[in-house]
């Protein structure tokens, strides 16, 4: 009888150890699965952040115009246009006041804004010089009248040549070189980015729901969600930091001061949006960590 009892106890202990090993393996497998889910959560958060940033910056006309305002782009373009026009006026025999009076801030701002709008509305991306030429021609006629200059056929030809040269300078100052490369894709790609953003948002929500609803214990839900948020924050932080640490933006070689300032300001502000996304994810990660600690302590004391 005593031997049978000992055998039963050994069998029970063996079954108990087998059950613990099985439970341990199952627990480890679940941990690996949830870690993988956390990785995919961080990846979708990173990609979603990029799409949202692109929507608010690269694919936004308002962002471009606000950057121009903040960087003093309009006044610099006006100054550069005026300087080049003065050189042309000098070479053509006009007084310098003619160029100074002709170029004004309102016309320059309107021309630049129309040019920018054309890229985001899928219109013609060429700078319209019709109004500029007509206005300049009227100004030249008025100048000739004030200076008692007779408009002979030869003078008329010179005036036309002057107007065409001035129009070339105008186009050169109003247009933005890198926009001619990416501008054609802005309109067509914006809808794709919107679809991608919505898809990533849904995928992120699905992963969070899987972590939440398949975990029996609340502290584990918050732990794996926190992992995903920290991973998303780190990857989002790394991209702009790597570019800024290499100091590539200020080293870009651009001919005009206005375009250089616009380029540097444009990308510095764009990277600022990356850091806003990082801050949001860090705050959410801290909240999830606090909730994890709270429910973990309850779990330990139960």
Image (cartoon, rainbow, N blue to C red):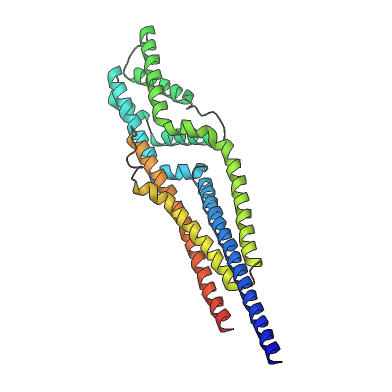
Hey, which quadrant is residue 221 in on the image? bottom right
Q: Residue furthest bottom?
A: 2
Q: Is residue 273 left or right of residue 258?
A: right
The percent coordinates of residue 168 (x first, y second) are 40, 22
Q: How many marks?
A: 0
Hey, which quadrant is residue 22 in on the image? bottom right
Q: Determine the residue positioned at 70% across, 88% down.
A: 4
Q: Is residue 145 left or right of residue 15?
A: left
- Say if residue 211 shows up in the picture: yes
In the rendered image, the vertical position of residue 115 relative to residue 129, given as above or below: below
The percent coordinates of residue 254 (x first, y second) are 34, 34
Between residues 245 and 133, which one lies in front from this camera angle?
245
- Say if residue 72 shows up in the picture: no
Q: Determine the residue positioned at 27% across, 21% down.
A: 90
Q: Is residue 163 left or right of residue 119?
A: left
Between residues 111 and 66, which one lies in front from this camera angle?
66
Q: Determine the residue positioned at 57% across, 33% down.
A: 122
The percent coordinates of residue 135 (x first, y second) are 43, 24
In the rendered image, the vertical position of residue 282 relative to residue 103, given as above or below: below
Quadrant that contains the C terminus: bottom right
Quadrant that contains the N terminus: bottom right
The percent coordinates of residue 228 (x first, y second) are 53, 60
Between residues 193 and 297, which one lies in front from this camera angle?
297
Q: Is residue 243 left or right of residue 26?
A: left
In the rendered image, the vertical position of residue 196 relative to residue 10, given as above or below: above
Between residues 154 and 267, which one lies in front from this camera angle?
267
Q: Determine the residue positioned at 46% across, 60% down.
A: 279
């Amino acid at each position: 009888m005593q031997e049978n009892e000992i055998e039963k106890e050994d069998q029970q202990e063996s079954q108990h150890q087998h059950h613990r090993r099985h439970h341990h393996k199952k627990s480890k497998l679940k941990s690996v699965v949830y870690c993988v889910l956390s990785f995919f959560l961080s990846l979708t958060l990173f990609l979603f952040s990029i799409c949202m940033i692109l929507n608010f910056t690269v694919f936004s006309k308002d962002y471009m115009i606000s950057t121009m305002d903040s960087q003093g782009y309009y006044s610099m373009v006006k100054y550069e246009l005026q300087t080049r026009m003065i050189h042309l006026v000098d070479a053509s025999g006009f007084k310098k006041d003619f160029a100074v009076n002709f170029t004004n801030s309102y016309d320059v701002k309107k021309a630049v804004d129309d040019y920018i709008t054309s890229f985001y509305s899928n219109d013609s991306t060429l700078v319209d010089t019709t109004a500029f030429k007509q206005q300049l021609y009227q100004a030249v006629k008025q100048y000739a009248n004030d200076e008692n200059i007779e408009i002979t056929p030869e003078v008329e030809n010179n005036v036309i040549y002057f107007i065409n040269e001035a129009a070339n300078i105008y186009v050169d100052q109003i247009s933005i070189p890198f926009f001619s490369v990416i501008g054609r894709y802005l309109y067509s790609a914006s809808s794709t980015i919107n679809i991608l953003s919505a898809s990533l948002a849904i995928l992120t929500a699905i992963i969070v729901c899987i972590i939440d609803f398949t975990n029996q214990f609340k502290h584990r839900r918050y732990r794996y969600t926190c992992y995903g948020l920290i991973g998303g924050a780190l990857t989002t932080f790394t991209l702009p930091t790597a570019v800024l640490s290499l100091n590539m933006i200020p080293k870009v070689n651009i001919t005009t001061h206005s375009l250089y300032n616009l380029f540097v300001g444009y990308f510095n502000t764009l990277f600022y949006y990356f850091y806003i996304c990082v801050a949001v994810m860090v705050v959410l990660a801290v909240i999830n960590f606090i909730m994890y600690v709270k429910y973990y302590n309850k779990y330990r004391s139960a």
